[in-house]
Structure formats: structure tokens, C-alpha cells
Amino acid sequence: MSELVAAYLPEFIIFVFIIINLIFSLFAGTSAYRISKWTAMLGIILAIGSTIYLQIDPEVYAFDNMFLTNIYTVFFKILILISGFFLILLSRNMIREKRDRASEYFSVFLSGLLFAMCTVSSVNFVSLFVSLEALGLSCYLLLALNKNPNAKQLTFGYLVQGAVVSSLFLMGLSVVYGMCAQLDYTKASLCFSQNPSQILLTFALILMICTILFKLGLVPFSSWLPDTFEGANYPISAYMSCIPVLACFAALSRILMTFLSYTFTVKIVLACIAVLTILFGSLSAIRQENLKRLMAYSMSVQSGIMLLGLCVFSVYSLSSVLFYLFCYTVANIGAWAAIILLYNSAKLEKLEDLKGIWYHRPYYVMAFTIILIALAGVAPTCGFVAKLYVFSAVARSGFVFLPFLIIALVSSVIMIYGYWRIIRAMFRRIETEIVTDPRVISSKYILYACAIASVVICLFADKLVRLCQLVAYYM
Amino acid sequence: MNFLSLIWLIFLPVIAAIVIMLPVFPNHQVKIRRFAKWFAGLHFIYSLLFLLFFDTSMFGMSFEKELTFFGMTWLKTLGISAKFAVDGITLLLCVLTTFIVLITLFMSKMHIRTKHKLYYSMVFLLESAVLGIFCAKDMFLFFVFWELLLIPVYFIVAQWGNSEARSAATKFTVASFVANMFLFFGMLILYYYNFAVSNVLTANIESLNMDEKIYPMWFQITVFVNFLIGFILRIPLVPFHNWYPDIQSKSAAPVNILLAGLLSATGVYGVIRFNMQVFPEIFKLFAPALMVWGLVNILYSGALSVMQAGVKKMVAYSQIAATGFVLLGLASLNQTGFNGAVFMILACSIVYCALFVVISSVQFRTKTTYITALGGLGQVMPKCMYLALIICFAAIGIPFLMMFTPKLMVLAGAMLSNLDQQLLVKVSAAIGLVAMMVSAGYILYFFYKVFCSVLLEQWKGLKDLSPQETSVLSALCLVIVYFGINPMSVIQIYQSVSSIILDVLQV
């Protein structure tokens, strides 16, 4: 029992707060939207506290070895919870408009966090499948919050494609179970190394990975990403670019490191996928006019770079990917805070609308510029150290990966231009009348905090690098 | 001696930039300007103190200092540290940087009329980046400052230039990012190949020396070429030079001064630090090609310079031509040529800075930089004309002015060079000598067109230089004349360093 508590307490706390929010939604009505918001935030804070407090043993299993808690999962869970906390703060204005649905929104939001955390912890194919599906479901529900019929059409593609890739996962799952009669990672990996028909098993695993690649918006499955982002509400798009990415990378790196680290072909295939994603994403990003679509392609490019780091299959490269994820999360939340801020205060959604914004809000624009520089991976920010770390991990792996490295470098330069267009637009000389709404305080502070953090992380990178190496070692 | 810390030298401008940007700092242009000038002046004096306490007989780096964050090395686990140090060459370049920033700030008052906070903080950020480039002891630290430089350059060009400045600035930034990609790639593979061979994870420039016996030739050539592409875009050399006249002709006058003084110096410094010191063998291999390349640079941009319609483009092209001499000197691989080349960087920065100061004064009065619209200004602006005459003579290479000694040393070095292709070397040196004569043509053409020919009707009422402009120009002329008469005072500072660099490179 104590093991169960040690492994599962944060999730349980989140679960309790989901129930509390659901009960609120029954009788609280429109007046209590603030209470449900604070409840949700309290839940997240308690969960973070318990995650940190309970981390005593190196490894704790629960639910018949389906669910693992160690430093690796704690790292991801804390990242997920903290970004969830900020995302709640960012969704303030959206909730104002839909007060009657606030409690429902928060229960769905928290359940998304819950299943993201379960995805991080699962060491069994079934639990992975269930958590990924439930995470997907909560995303569908959040997307459905937008009442605009056009938006429904845009997000419908995500639902359909999501269903298709889930069936791929099931197919792979059935093949693995049929061949090995095992669904546990460690036992199945033993079966993997001994089984004569390894090609079929590898194929089955790739089918399963497809689901994760889909959620990350990697190349064969990236078509849903910009449409869905455009159709969703702003905080939901921010949510989609943050929580599933963290959860999926945790799961993906675990699967890759457990099963596929010796298969050279898989490495090359994954590296091809990564490089194509980066190239395709950056080439598409430089033509976007809508900020949300640009951010969608940005997410695609960033996941591509991280996948390229993962393909190398070493503890070093894994730690570099963890570092990249951390920096990506900081910069991404900051970027969305800025975009939400601009939208809430003056309904700016296109690059054209941003022209001359510098004259009205110089400090927002400066903070946003720093964050965009961090996302682009340019020098005095955490993005640069992250890019250096991942690319150096790729360079370290030998000459096979050099072509991939070159393509990734070229496309990351293209992507720098993609971000540069936003900066250029904001500093344009055209004076426009922008009526700004002063009631956007929380996103402002998140924006400033992320901008400062992305510089400070660059200076104190060593501490974080060591932490990431420790985490990667314990996986 | 303890108060001399390179960390302060490099990061004080960043602090000043942040202070200016803070909301509590009054948004009043006079206060901002005064603060900026005082700061730049004190910073210049601070950098002079380094020169005063510098031991010229020292053979290695001095003033070594590591930036730690509460006792932690920056990125220690990756073998990357934030170490700074200077030798004779870089110390001179640092002093040059602070001096040029001071000059720029003195000239900024007339031309910068909006967004003062952003302008002055960006200038200080640029200064910090340039100082960081010169002082960094670590490859990736160098790269951080190298990329940091692009952000302020973009802003100061785009925000205060004319209507086309924005596209020119974007062009420069994009081109630089592409070049930086080559540089970054070269650094990455060098970093890991070094790790694979020596089993020490380090990015310290001194410990990266490529030995021909250990590292295969093709690898060294690959990295060398990658580095070279990264640096020559910044210098700039001929096929990659297009951005430079472009941003110079479109940006505001004080920005011209700043860019003319600092950008090409960083590029040349990169070539010396990386291509010469890390890959001496490959540099020897490439030296004849580089010599010819420098020559092409001198002739081609000299010819382009005469054809320009704008004064700024004209001077920018002639600066590119003058940087060709630097390459000629570096490629000759002997003490004379190398010392001349390093002196040439300094002379080029100072002289072309001064030329842009002259142009800035003219532009402020006439609001135009087209050569057809100017003429005969010497009649109404005699002070300006006489000071400009000294500067133009210096640019040509008249004896006892700053550019004479380096040009002479470079050409002598090229003539005496022991490279294998003797015929090529001698022919190059001879052509360089002729080109030096020709350069007199386009500089004097510029001077004649602006100050001497018939005075146009609309310029009759122009006022002569203000006391501030006069003092700035006189200070520059004083520097030009002093180091023209007394070149050894500069050369002896970096003599010991250049002898170490050339020990390896000597043919």
C-alpha cells in the first residue's frame, strides 16, 4: 500500500481535484468560476509538492508493474505540472467568456494533466495505450470548447487522424502480444532480443510509435497540426503544444531506449523522419501569416530536433533531449503568453496586425523578442545551449549522422528566419491605433518570467545539464 | 591591478544597456545621451588602463579571468567554460572598440531623433558583443558573442536608417545566420573530433591546435573552409561583400561609423585566431590562394568604388578594398606582413571611421549623400575640408599618416614572402603596389567631388563644423597623425604575440 502511495500520490491528488471540480460544476453555476480555477491551481501545487516530497526510493512500481515512478518520471511530471499551472493562468480571459463552463473546463484540463503523467509513468503497452488515448480524449474535449463552426471543421481532422493512428497502435500491440505474450517493457524487451522474427516485432513497434509521432506532429502525420491550432482557442493551442509533447517524449524515449537501441535501420528511419520534419516545418513556417499556425510549425520543428537527438540512442543524447525539452517548455509557454497577451489586449492574430506594436508596448515586445530568440536557438539564451547540446550529441555519434546534422542546421537557419519575421513585424515603423486592455496581468508576468528565465537558464546551464544527465542515467 | 577585470570590461556595457532600458530611467533624451557619453568615456579610460598595465614582453595570454556563476563554470560538463583573456592583438582591438563607440556616441546627437533608449542600449549591447568576441578563450563562447552581435546590428540599422534600411538589415542578418551555420558546423565537428582523438572534452581554443600527424588532412580542410566562410562574410571579402555597402548606404550616419569600425575587425580577428592558429598547416596550403583573393578584393572593389552614385557606398567599397591588404599581409606568412596586417586592421577602422564622421557631418547639413548633389563644400566648410584632407591622405597611404606604415609593411611582406609559388607572390606584390597607387584615385575622386568642384547654389548658406564635431574629427586626426609618426608604439605591443603565431607558420 505504501508503495502505491509513493508511486501514485500526485496522480491521485489530481484525480481528487478533478472530482471536486466536477462537483462544483453541478451546483456552483456561473458565479464560482474563480473558485474552480483556484481549486485547480491548488490541486496542481499539492501535486507538485507531493511529487517532490515522495521521491525517496530510486524506483517504485505500482499496479502490478504497470506504473513506474523514478527520477525520470518525476522530472517530467514536475515539468508537466508547472506548465499546467502556467497554462491555467494563461486561460483566464477565455474562462471569463465561458463562466458557466469553467468547472468543466478545469476538470477536463486536469484530466489531461493526469493522463499525461500516467503516460510518463507507464512501463506497459496497455497502460501506455490507455493513457495516450485518454490524453487524446481530453484534448478533443478541450478543442470542442470553441463554438465557432469553422473551428470545428478545422479540428475535425485531428479527431479522425487520431482515431486512425490509435488503431495502428492497437495493431502493433496485438502483434507484440501475439509474438511475445508479454506487454511489460522489460519482459517484452527480453523477448525482443531472443525472438527470431525480429523484423516483424520492430515493425509492430514502429506502428505503435506512429501514435506518438502523430501527437508530436512529426512529418507523415503533421497535417493536422496547423489547422487544429488555428481552430482552437488560444490557451488550448498552448496546451496542445506543451503537455502532449512532454508526455509523448517521455514515452517515446523510454520505448526507443528499451527496444530499439540496437537496430541501425530504425535509427536511420527515425533520423529521416526528424530531418524531414524540421525541413518541412521550417519551410512552411516562413510563409505563415497567422501566429497560431506559425507556432504550430514551430512546435513541429522543435519536436523534429528533439527526435533527431533521440535517434542517437545514448545517455548523453537523451540528457541533451531532456535539456532541450526543458528549454522548449520555458520558451514555448513564454511565446504563448505573449501571443495570448497580444490577442486578449488588442485582438491581434496575424503578423500584419503586429506592425508598430513596439510603440505601444515596448516591454512586452522586448520580452517576446527574447523568447523568440530562445526558440530560434540564437546565442545568449537557453535555446542556444539546448541546440548546441543536441547537435553536439548528434555530431558525437559519428559520421553516419553528419548529413542529418547538416540538413538540420540548414533548416534551423530557415526557421530562424521564420521567427525573425515576427520580430521584424513588431518593430515596423507603421503607426497603428491599438486599443489595449489593461486587464491582462497574469500573462504579462508569465511573459516576463519566461523571458528572464530563458536568459538565466543559459547562464546557469551547467546545473541543469547535470540534472538532465542524472535523470537520463536513471531512466 | 586587481581592479582590471576583463569580465567588467565586457559586461559593463550590458549593464549600462539594461540600466538605460529600465522603466525607472528617465525617458529624456538629454539625460540618456549624457549618461551614455559619460559611461562610454569612462569605459574607454578603463580599457586604456589595461593597455597601461599590459606587459608587452609577455608571450601568452594575460588578464585571464573566468566568469563563474556562484562558483560554477559555465557548461563545465560539456567542457565549455566562460574564460576570457587578451593578448597584444586583442587588447588593441578592445581599446579600438571602446574608442569607436565613444566617437559614435559623440556623433549620435544630430542624427538620432527617436527611440533614444533603444538606440543607446543597442549600441552598448553591440560593444559588449564585440569585446566578447575579442576576449573569448573558448570556441563556443566566441560563437555566443558572434551571434549576439547580429541582434543589435539588425536593430540599429533597421530602426534608424532610411526607408530601405529594413530590407538591407534583414539581408545582412539572414546572410550572417547562413554563414554562422557553417561556422557552427565546423565548430561542432572540430569539438568532437578533438574529443575522439584526445579523449578530453574541451572547446578551449588553445588546446584545439590541429596537428597534421593526428588529424587527417581532409578533415582539417573541411573545418578550415567552414570557418573561413563564416569569417569572410563578416570581413567582408568579394563574392560575399554585397551586404556591406548596402547597409552602410541605408543606415544612419553614426551607425555607419560604428559598423565601419567594428564589423570587419571581428571578421579578421576570427581568421587570425582560428584559421591561422588552429590550422597552421592548412593556412600554409591556402596562403597563395588567399593572397590572390586579397588582390582580387583590392582591384574589384576599388573599381566598384569609383562607379558608385552615393558617397557612403563609395567609401564602403573602398574600405573593402583596403581590407584586401589585410588578407595580403596575413597570407604572406612572415613577420613583416603579419605585423602590417594587424596594424592595417586598426588603421582601416580608424581611418574609415573618420571618413564616415566627415560624411555624417556633410549629410547632417545637406540631407543627401548623392555625389552629384554635392560639390564645392570646401568653400563653405573649410574646417571640415582641411580635416577631411588629412583623413583622405591617410586613406591613400601618404607617409607620416596612419595607413602608410601598414600598407608598406604588407607590401614588403608580400614581396619578401617565402611561399612556394614565387612567381605568383612577386606578381601579386607588384600588382598590390600598383593597386595602392590606384586607390589614391578613388579616394581623391571622393574628396574632389565633395569638397572641391563647383559649389551648388543651395549649399551657399551651410554652416561649418560645430565645436563638438571639430573636436571629434581633430581627435581622430590626432590619432592618425600620432600613429603615423610613431608606428612602433603600436607594433611593439603585439610583437611578441605575432612572433609566436608565426613560429608555427613560418615557411
Image (cartoon, grey):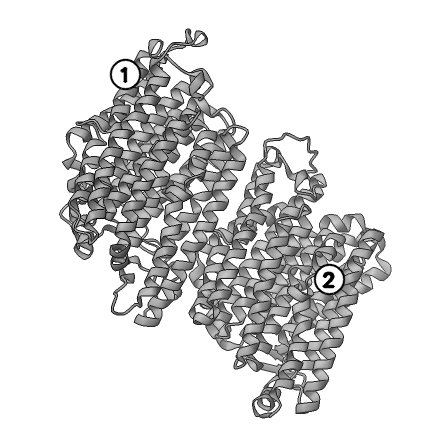
Q: Is the C terminus of chain B in the top left, top right, bottom left or bottom right quadrant?
A: bottom left
User: Which chain hosts label 1?
Assistant: B
Against A135, residue B465 (above or below) is above
Residue A198 position in % (x across, y down)? 60, 87
Residue ID at (39%, 32%): B304
> Mark 1 packing: few (<14 Cα in 10 Å), some, or many (20+)?
few
Residue assigned mark 2: A109
| Residue B8 seen from this side | no
Kindly identify the amino acid type of the residue bearing the numbered disc 1: Tyr
The answer for how far apart the CA atoms under marks 2 and 1 are is: 75 Å
User: Which chain hosts label 2?
Assistant: A
- Please tell me in which quadrant of the rendered image residue A236 appears: bottom right
> In front: B407, or B50?
B407
Residue assigned mark 1: B386
Against A188, residue A312 (above or below) is above
Q: Secondary structure at mark 2?
A: helix
Residue A453 position in % (x across, y down)? 52, 53
Against B424, residue A330 (above or below) is below
| Residue A235 seen from this side | yes
Residue B333 position in % (x across, y down)? 20, 50
Residue A325 position in % (x across, y down)? 56, 63
> Mark 2 packing: few (<14 Cα in 10 Å), some, or many (20+)?
many
Q: Secondary structure at mark 1?
A: helix
Label disc, if present, on residue A221 of the rendered structure: none
B36 left or right of A266 in image:
left
Q: Is the N terminus of chain B in the top left, top right, bottom left or bottom right quadrant?
A: top left
Kindly identify the amino acid type of the residue bearing the numbered disc 2: Phe
- Please tell me in which quadrant of the rendered image residue A84 appears: bottom right
